[in-house]
Amino acid sequence: MDTRKGFKLTLCVTSLLLAAVVGASAWTWANYVTVFTGGGLCVQGDAGIDHIRPGTLSGNLAYSDAYARDQQCFNGLVGRWATTRLDVYHAAAGQPGAICRGTDWKSDYTGIDSFGNPIGPSWVFNYGGPASCGSGWYGVFGGAFVWDGSTWRGGWVWSGWEWVPPATLAMVTSTSAQNQTYNEQTPPPRPDWVDADGKVNMEKAPKEVPMAGPNGNRIMEAGKEKQVPTHFGTLPPPPLRTDMSRRGQ
């Protein structure tokens, strides 16, 4: 198992134990969501988000991954060129999600680890926690695409909402205060362009969304919320390599 996968697995196990003990939202994750099947290819993606809780294995980190499997979404495929990127969204009381921060595309070949699990390009991105766009609910849209030899195949995955407390509270060693503020919150609904399994419905996905400022408020422009383009319809250019189906490497 590579270092990144090992860290993520340890983080998930630790977070689950924390959630069982203290009852708070420890991390939010959508794993192996299928975003495309066809032509002998299944594309799956991850999207996840966490925030710092002192005394636990945690971080202000956002995640995305892209995987290639056979059309039955069972066996991992080796040597397929894949790419992923992520956008971090923020929502506060009475406000829908707005884009806060994000990454560019990261590409690499897909493969299989020593446990038989698929691996591929991955982002582990420090989004800054409450210092980025204030306290509130954060979520990640992760893009997962695989080159089939002529075009990109894939889609986007939604992590779900994660409560991130104010910076002063985020560093409280005791979790009781974090639990109280978390339990007083009501998470925003799932964006209406996201299906129940976490897959983004591209026919409904917006072309523009508001932009969140450093205090969580929406950035205003000419008396209106500033709108910025989403990346749901944006793909990287075709890969430079012509051999995108190397096997056994």
Image (cartoon, rainbow, N blue to C red):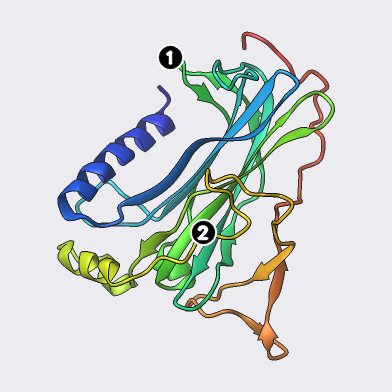
Residue 57 point in image, percent of width and height = 27, 46
In this view, the mark in front (2 or 1)? 2
Q: Is residue 93 left or right of residue 36?
A: left
Spatial separation of the CA atoms under disc 2 and disc 1: 35 Å
Q: Check disc 1 and report its element: helix, strand or loop.
A: loop
- The vertical placement of 212 against 156, above or below, is below
Instruction: Name the residue located 69 percent from the left edge and 22 percent from the top edge.
Output: 41
Residue 233 point in image, percent of width and height = 76, 51
Image quadrant occupied by the N terminus: top left
Instruction: Name the residue located 54 percent from the left edge and 18 percent from the top edge.
Output: 74
Residue tagged 1: 114
Q: Earlier in the sequence, mark 2 or mark 1?
A: 1
Residue 65 point in image, percent of width and height = 55, 37
Residues at circles 2 and 1 in contact by the CB criterion of under 8 Å:
no
In terms of image quadrants, where is residue 88? bottom right
Crowding at label 2, few (<14), some or many (≥20) Cα neighbours within 10 Å? some
Looking at this view, name the residue that lies furthest to the front.
Answer: 196
- The vertical placement of 179 against 242, above or below, is below
Looking at this view, name the residue that lies furthest to the top.
Answer: 248
- Mark count: 2
Q: Is residue 123 visible?
A: no
In terms of image quadrants, where is residue 70? top right
- The vertical placement of 74 against 204, above or below, is above
Residue 173 point in image, percent of width and height = 17, 62
User: Residue 56 shows which numbered tag?
Assistant: none
Q: Amino acid at mark 1?
A: Ser
Residue tagged 2: 190
Image quadrant occupied by the C terminus: top right
Q: Is residue 40 left or right of residue 162?
A: right
Q: Amino acid at mark 2?
A: Arg
